[in-house]
Image: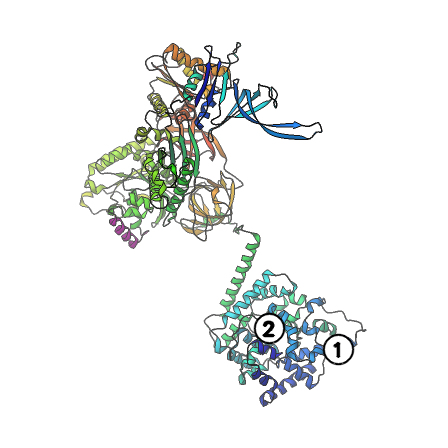
Amino acid sequence: MSRHRIKDVDYDDDDFYDDDDVTADPEEQEFLQQCTTAVLQQLNAGQPSVTATKEEVQDALWHYYNDIEKSVNYLRGKREKEATKLQKSKIQPVPAYPAPPTTAHFSAADFFRDCPWLNIPSHRKSEILIEPLYPRLGLLGGAPENGGKLSKLAALAAARKKKDGEKAPSQPETSTPSTPKFEQPKTSSLDHPGTARSLRDRLAASGRSTPKASEGPASLRRLATPSSSSHPTPKRPESESDTEKPSASDVSESMQRMVLEPKEPEPQQPVPTIRALPSTFASTIVGAATGPTAAEPSHLHSNSSDLLRIYGQDHAEPFDFAAPSPDDVVLNAQNTAKGMKSKSAASKSAAIKKGQSDIAGGMKDLSVGDKVTVQSKNLDVLSEYKKSTRKRSANFVVIGHVDAGKSTLMGRLLADQGAIDQRTLDRYRREAEKIGKGSFALAWVLDQGSEERARGVTIDIATNQFETDKTAFTIVDAPGHRDFVPNMIAGASQADFAVLVIDSSVGKFESGLKGQTKEHALLVRSMGVQKIVVAVNKMDTVQWNHERFEEIEQQISAFLTTAGFQDSNISFVPCSGVLGDNISQRTDDPRASWYTGRTLIEELETSEPYTHALEKPLRMTIGDVFRGGVQNPLSISGRIDAGSLQMGDQILIMPSGETATVRSLEVDSEPSDWAVAGQNVVLNIANIDPIHLRSGDVVCRPSSPIPTITSFTAKVLAFEHLMPMQVDVHRGRLHVPGRISKLVASLDKASGAAIKKRPKIVGPGVVARIVVEMDQAVPLEAPTRIVLRAGGSTVAAGLLE
Amino acid sequence: MRCIKNKIEHNGSGAVTLCPDEPEDMWHAYNLIRPGDILRASAIRRVTTVQDTGSTSSARVHLNLIIRVKNLDFDPQSSQLHVSGQIMNETAHTKIGQFHTLDLELNRNFTLEKEVGSDGEGVGWDSIAIESLKDAVDEGGKRRAEAVAVVMQEGLAHICFIGQFQTILKQKIEMSVPRKRQGGGDHDKGMNKFFKVTLETLLRQMEFNTSLTSGANNEAVRPVLLASPGFVASGFQKYIQSEASTTTPGLKRLLPSLVVVHSASGYTNSLSEVLQSPAVKTILADTKYARETKLMDDFLEQLRKETNKATYGPREVEYAVEQGAVGRGGGVLIVSNRLFRSQDIAERKRWVSLVDRVRDVEGGDVRILSSDHESGKRLEGLGGIAALLTFPLIEPDLDSDAE
């Protein structure tokens, strides 16, 4: 046997013939003598006591590399087999526990044990015994086989053997110190074979279902419940011999024994136990190998339904999967020996556990297909929301005519509040100056698009967050250009209140008033915004002229009042975005001493907390569909209009009618488990094709879907003449073409009563009920605020009925 | 369309033989052919014969069939006209009274005959029909002016062919372009992809040959109008330029015909704005649709002013005509040609007589707008008929007969 193996490990054959066969070494002889006595003692002491000749014992010891326990088991088994043969006619006693299937008991060694082959040279026999089973449970860890090195697993096996062999509890002292001797020379190379082995085990466990693979689950179980190395192990003679002869042969032998063990039904010596010993029959059947299990009264063993035991696969017993994994044992041994290692066994076992669950999970995922299932935490979102101690949050939209300085003002605000760091700001400044747009540096905080920067115009809305002591603000910076009013509408639909930025410089204010200043103000009002803060910007260009400010204040407040804002909800702040005056800090310009009111940030903080329809069914308009990254291949963002959602929820996308699963979600760029109405969220979703997602679609629950309609009646306030005409219908990001098909009636502003039925045309400022038809089905439901635009201007806004 | 033979009698009956030679002619045919007419055209019919033994065999036979039209089906996108009706001539393979659907084909003559029935069964070649025929027959081939318009916005493009009489939406491109995000560069990537797809589709629809070697190089390129709000169209132009200078030099031929104009949105709604833009007006000056668009704008302007000198809707216009408001000195009757396509003969007669009255009796101007144009679509919204009046007219309350 050993010869063959030595060949395997590429040692010079001759050397090892000498080493093994020539037993002239007095030390070895003495050791052999010791072992023989030990075996004989055990055989006698055991139940039933067995007798064996010295030659037999020595022969067995030779075969088992001086392993006392195995030799004992082997000899005992041999005797018992002979005894059974003789007593075949006798009544068979009922086994103490269900007889394990005998097929599982099969092992080549056992099967051929009493055949004459046993006497043939061992190197031939070994081929039969080992070859076919080698790969199954063998240690493929690739232990270093050159001189003096001992693989981790070999070392483990040694340690285990030692412990198993220990009958007297006095032994650990000798066995533990011996372990480091094995390992110290090559601790660095230890980890890899071990991990490879355990990984393979686990893979085999989850991947196969052959009877033999039942070790798999066992190994899993063991990994899941790693115990300390306090497993009582029998003393192993090698521990002594190692010290004198840490030769390569020894190392490889011990390693190879590990290899062999799983397959050979090496009957193990029942150690003194609290359990009754198995009956003769049982011992015969199970090969007297109940030893370790009986010997170990550990709770780890007793409470688990060990598959190994059920199937009686005692031939796998030497691995004793309920015990710590080889890695653990080695590491424990190292730890006890050296006191401390950098990697603790606990963390290692935790890592193994994790890895194992990962792999198991991965396998499960594979088998299920590409469906992603997300476990919902089944939170009661509303109570979570009440419990949470978030800051008051407020969203506001920044509106105004193009070039009024909206983005710059907000850039300044963010810079002052520390939401943007100085280094980034300096970089923007440098880059902006490089292309000759130095004054746009602050705006670049929000204007991230390349086109926006090149042209110096905000094109799409940008959101950003900052916090004051009291409130967490979300800025929605809207574009001022008339072509991008649809984007501004999308931004305004996310806002609780608005900041209207006005360019106070000469001429600009007047042109702005004709342009988007008015349109934006009307739009935000018609979308339900109540409070408006007017930032009279660029005051430095008019030398902080008080009259100028008052003139603007007068004109704007008159206009805003007619637009439907209440006086108490309008406030004016003179400021300068470029210089940062009256934004966060009061200006120190002496020319502005006339202003004693609040700064912009103080004005923002006076906003009332806003309530949202938390209890209503979920509605969220998709603002953007994008790839969130490798982890989140598909993400959607938007603001929840009503209701709440949490991780793992099924959501329905309308009008496509496809469902998706929320993998995870972010609230204001922070990961969260849930979100409620009023929050800006990013949903990372799965199980849906991106073609079903467009911005403007509505997310709802499958249980309460939003209806899709092709025509609706709305009560609108006309900003321009309305007649049967083609219009664009806007609601948040939703933008669809439609046409006014019928003017039902013009209505009285105050009472809502019809003034004229079927008017031919509805003039500006008149409230009318109209019917709008659309070519495609659109998710809309009453009451929703909609905006109708035509030819680049807003013609009406109102409420769906 | 070429007129091969014209045999229209004074009483309005008679037949014309026409040869359609471009896809838009199908649209003209669609306007000319009415239910009840007699149409003779070549057809391929599958004939199934049953042998005495009961076995069947079917064969395709080429026939010249005469049918009495029952129904018309026009597919504007592919410019195909299917006319179904009952067969009137006996052939070896068909019986009288069997149904057949004729697919009119390009460059194959067809003969259309209209009858004047004594009992008002048919209306023959009335004034509208003769006018349509005049529109349809283009002897000089002079109204080839056509433009391609790409109306786009972020992630959305409509490729339209603007013909003399119809605007065909050839293809809609819709793509999800990620919005700008904090620190994300997906937007530019998405836009590039969007431009790429749009250009590919445009070239395919135009049947534009990008290879440099082909003999098609001298072929005139139709003007291509790129319209969008904001900078999308100019971005697309830039993209085409960069493509032309790098990967596909064949595109250089296209570059001079690109015109970037502004539109309010990426939907076909804004085509009217495109057609009115000064840049386009110079290219497509004095084409029929440009005039139509202008007319509609004038009308809407008049309506906006609330001078009561403009009215719309069937009843209102009829009332105005009765009052003599659509007469000499600025009275214009604007009618969508959809009204004349009505299945109901009485309905058609109603509109034809109204048109004849305005033109011949009142002396007003009559404009028939193509319902397949942007202006026609706007008119559709108003009920298909509108009128500019010579004097302000306040209509009596017509609520009573509102449905």
**Can you identify the residue that label 1 sits on?**
A82
User: Same subunit under labels 2 and 1?
Assistant: yes
Q: Which residue is label 2 attached to?
A: A259
Q: Nearer the viewer, residue A72 or A390?
A: A72
Residue A178 vs A768, above or below: the answer is: below
Instruction: Tell me: B149 left or right of B107.
Output: left
Residue B59 position (above or below residue A373): above
Q: Position of residue A245 (x, y in %)?
A: 54, 84
Asked if the residue under mark 1 is in contact with the one under mark 2, i.e. CB atoms within 8 Å, the reply is no
Viewer can see residue A732: no
Q: Give the Cα separation between the discs numbered 2 and 1.
A: 28 Å
Q: Chain of mark 1?
A: A
Q: Which residues are magenta?
A: A418-436
Neighbour tally class for label 1: few under 14, some 14-19, many 20 plus, Cα within 10 Å = few
Q: How many marks?
A: 2
Q: Horizontal and vertical percent for residue A684? A: 46, 49
**Closer to the eye: label 2 or 1:** 2
Q: Amino acid at mark 1?
A: Glu
Please name whichever residue, A651 or A618, is drawn nearer the observer in this view of the structure. A651
Label 2: element kind: helix
Badge 2 amino acid:
Val
Q: Is residue B240 magenta?
A: no
For label 1, the SS is helix
